[in-house]
């Protein structure tokens, strides 16, 4: 199959793309169609590698208002709402909602999803469902599953055993939530436990790290130090790191050296953290988002995630990562021309590094023929005009499509 006149990743020079047997067979300025070859003229539209959701909680997705709405919009009322919803969690329920969510994501150009799954459940219901879904959906989306101890590892009954069980069941990554543990000692021990568990069975690590406005929350330095000492480097990801927003600058200066040496990845979740952080502040209210601009300038790898989609903690969202990037650029003050133009990298190439997709990702000859086509001439316009993803191809197969969103005034 031949795609003519593609603007690949904002390149001013248009190229043709041939996909054969599910792989990119040829990418060149002009490729002649073979006799009978199906050809699509993209007319200069933007072609990107598929979008990557690098941080989401699919097990709670699409539960907002069921059985009750979060009226205050706070984290704490969200936890109360979730505890009511959790009572009726079944495997069939999780699978039905995840199937719907993944289709919404695919329609918005997503093909790779790292989902955290709550394993502070003695029955591990959601995890069992997600592991089955990983296989059932693999032709359409690659699910990467993180064992996420929502209520702590040391601070939840049998927390360590549940994490070990989750690893035996086949998760892709080990999580932790140090700022939620009862004590600082538990917090450090939970990080050590997670890193050693991951290292012992060759898993990735993704820690819910310092998701709080408390500047004394310093799980990040422990995560980075262990990643360096254990030589896990970029196999480790620190998600959220919102306390970094509140750290004093002298401390950050010292911390940055360690962060760079450690090579760890960062995931920022602008929608949820601007919504939930700063709630103990009067005025001024902190934005509660980690230092994306400074981390990026220091050469650290940062991606963006949706985190929650229409659930007790975040009542909006349809799986569209455009909204995540749009808000992220505002709150991180990254609105320079180049910053806007290149911001697709937060949900493509940077996220691919975090997920360790390697040669399974990217528009290059010999790699899987997976890409998306947006109704725009570059990403600046796509972001600004909220352009739809017209086509979503996975290994040469069209898995989602939408129509042009042209709007016309009638005068
Ligand atoms: Fe999260």
Image (tube, rainbow, N blue to C red):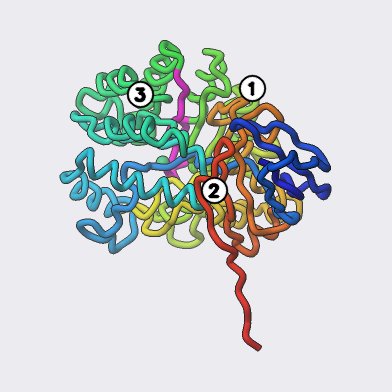
Label 1: which secondary element: helix
Residue 181 locus on image (x, y percent):
32, 31
Is residue 181 something that shows in the picture? no
Tag on residue 126?
none
Most foreground residue, 101 or 305: 101
Q: Which of the image's four quarters has the N terminus? A: top right
Label 3: which secondary element: helix
| 188 displayed left or right of 106 | left
Q: Nearer the viewer, mark 1 or mark 2?
A: 2
Please tell me whether residue 195 belongs to the stretch shown in magenta: no
Label 2: which secondary element: loop
Q: How far separated are the C-alphas under marks 1 and 2? A: 34 Å
Span colored in magenta: 203-219
Please tell me whether residue 210 belongs to the stretch shown in magenta: yes
For disc 3, the marked residue is 185
Q: Nearer the viewer, mark 2 or mark 3?
A: 2
Residue at far top of view: 200
Q: Residue at x 53, y 19 (%)?
A: 227
For disc 1, the marked residue is 261
Q: Which of the image's four quarters has the C terminus? A: bottom right
Q: Residues within 10 Å of mark 1 (few under 14, many from 20)?
A: some
Image position of 177 with respect to 245: above or below: above
Image position of 221 with respect to 321: above or below: above
Q: How far separated are the C-alphas under marks 3 and 1? A: 25 Å
Q: Are marks 3 and 1 in contact (CB under 8 Å)?
A: no
Most foreground residue, 98 or 333: 98
Q: Residues within 10 Å of mark 2 (few under 14, many from 20)?
A: many
Tag on residue 109?
2
Residue 121 locus on image (x, y percent):
22, 32
Q: Residue at x 80, y 48 (%)?
A: 14
Most foreground residue, 180 or 381: 381
């Amino acid at each position: 199959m031949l795609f003519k006149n593609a603007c690949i990743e904002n390149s001013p020079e248009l190229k043709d793309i041939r996909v054969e047997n599910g792989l990119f067979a040829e990418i060149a300025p002009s490729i002649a169609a073979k006799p009978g070859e199906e050809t699509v003229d993209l007319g200069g539209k933007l072609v990107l590698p598929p979008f990557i959701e690098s941080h989401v909680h699919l097990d709670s997705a699409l539960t907002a208002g069921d059985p009750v709405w979060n009226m205050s919009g706070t984290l704490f009322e969200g936890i109360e709402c979730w505890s009511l919803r959790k009572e009726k969690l079944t495997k069939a329920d999780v699978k039905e909602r995840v199937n719907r969510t993944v289709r919404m994501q695919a329609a918005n150009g997503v093909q790779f999803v790292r989902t955290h799954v709550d394993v502070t459940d003695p029955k591990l219901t959601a995890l069992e469902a997600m592991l089955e879904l990983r296989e059932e959906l693999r032709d359409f989306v690659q699910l990467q599953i993180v064992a996420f101890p929502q209520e702590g590892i040391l601070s939840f009954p049998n927390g360590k055993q549940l994490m070990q069980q989750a690893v035996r069941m086949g998760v892709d990554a080990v999580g932790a939530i140090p700022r939620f543990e009862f004590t600082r000692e538990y917090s450090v021990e939970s990080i050590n436990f997670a890193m050693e568990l991951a290292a012992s069975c060759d898993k990735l690590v993704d820690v819910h790290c310092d998701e709080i406005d408390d500047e004394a929350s310093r799980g990040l330095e422990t995560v980075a130090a262990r990643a360096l000492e254990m030589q896990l480097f970029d196999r480790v990801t620190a998600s959220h790191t919102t306390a970094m927003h509140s750290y004093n600058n002298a401390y950050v200066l010292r911390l940055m050296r360690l962060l760079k040496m450690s090579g760890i990845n960062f995931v920022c979740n602008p929608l949820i953290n601007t919504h939930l952080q700063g709630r103990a502040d009067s005025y001024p209210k902190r934005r509660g988002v980690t230092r994306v601009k400074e981390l990026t300038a220091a050469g650290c790898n940062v991606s963006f995630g949706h985190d929650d989609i229409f659930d007790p903690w975040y009542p909006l969202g349809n799986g569209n990562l455009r909204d995540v990037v749009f808000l992220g650029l505002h709150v991180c003050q990254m609105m320079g021309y180049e910053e806007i133009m290149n911001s697709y990298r937060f949900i493509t190439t940077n996220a691919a590094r975090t997920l360790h997709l390697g040669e399974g990702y990217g528009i290059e000859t010999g790699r899987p023929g997976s890409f998306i086509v947006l109704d725009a001439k570059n990403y600046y316009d796509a972001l600004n005009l909220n352009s739809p993803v017209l086509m979503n191809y996975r290994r040469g197969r069209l898995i989602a499509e939408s129509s042009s969103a042209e709007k016309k005034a009638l005068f």
